[in-house]
């Protein structure tokens, strides 16, 4: 397993930007893929973006063109750059690790979450 710590959430106006970070307790180059999920009040947790060990990325349709996931293996950190934020992006954002290729999403390791609030 791996411990994950998110940071970077906050309050921003619609159209603004935020950058989230997820620091891992082990080298992320040994982890098959990392991802970001979010959960809005009264809604199920949903997958936002993923990045594989090779750098391949995938995004939910709702964030394509606005969010960018990246990783810095030297810092064992994964980032989520969020631009053109909308009120619908308001949620608690969670980092997740899928350690093995054979595992399904979500992986077994979660961070504590960081709140993102977008005001209209």
Image (tube, helix red, strand yellow):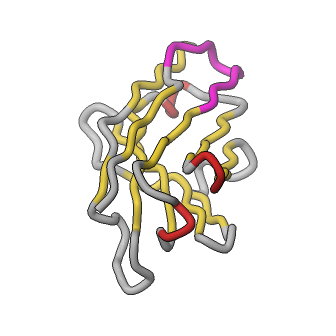
- Is the residue 29 above or below the residue 91 in the image? below
Q: Which quarter of the image is occupied by the N terminus?
A: bottom left
Residue 84 at x, y percent in the picture = 71, 30
| Picture quadrant where residue 5 is located | top left
Q: Which residue lies at the image location 33% right of the left edge and 43% below the top edge?
A: 111
Tally of numbered tags: 0
Looking at the picture, tell me which residue is in the foreground, 10 or 71.
71
Residue 95 on the magenta segment: no
- Is the residue 2 above or below the residue 31 in the image? above
| Picture quadrant where residue 15 is located | top right
- Is the residue 115 above or below the residue 120 in the image? below
Q: Which residues are magenta?
A: 10-19
- Is the residue 89 above or below the residue 44 in the image? above
Q: Which residue lies at the image location 59% right of the left edge and 63% below the top edge?
A: 51
Q: Which residue lies at the image location 48% right of the left edge and 50% below the top edge?
A: 36
Residue 113 at x, y percent in the picture = 35, 35
Looking at the picture, tell me which residue is in the foreground, 98 or 105.
98
Q: Main secondary structure of the magenta part?
A: strand
């Amino acid at each position: 397993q791996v411990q994950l710590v998110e940071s970077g959430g906050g309050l921003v106006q619609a159209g603004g930007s935020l950058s989230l970070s997820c620091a891992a307790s082990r080298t992320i180059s040994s982890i098959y893929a990392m991802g970001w999920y979010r959960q809005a009040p009264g809604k199920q947790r949903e997958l936002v973006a993923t990045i594989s060990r090779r750098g391949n990325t995938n995004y939910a349709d709702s964030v394509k063109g606005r969010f960018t996931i990246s990783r810095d293996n030297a810092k064992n950190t994964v980032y989520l750059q969020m631009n053109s934020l909308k009120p619908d992006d308001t949620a608690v954002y969670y980092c997740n690790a899928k350690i093995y290729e054979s595992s399904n999403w979500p992986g077994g390791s979660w961070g504590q979450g960081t709140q993102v609030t977008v005001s209209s």
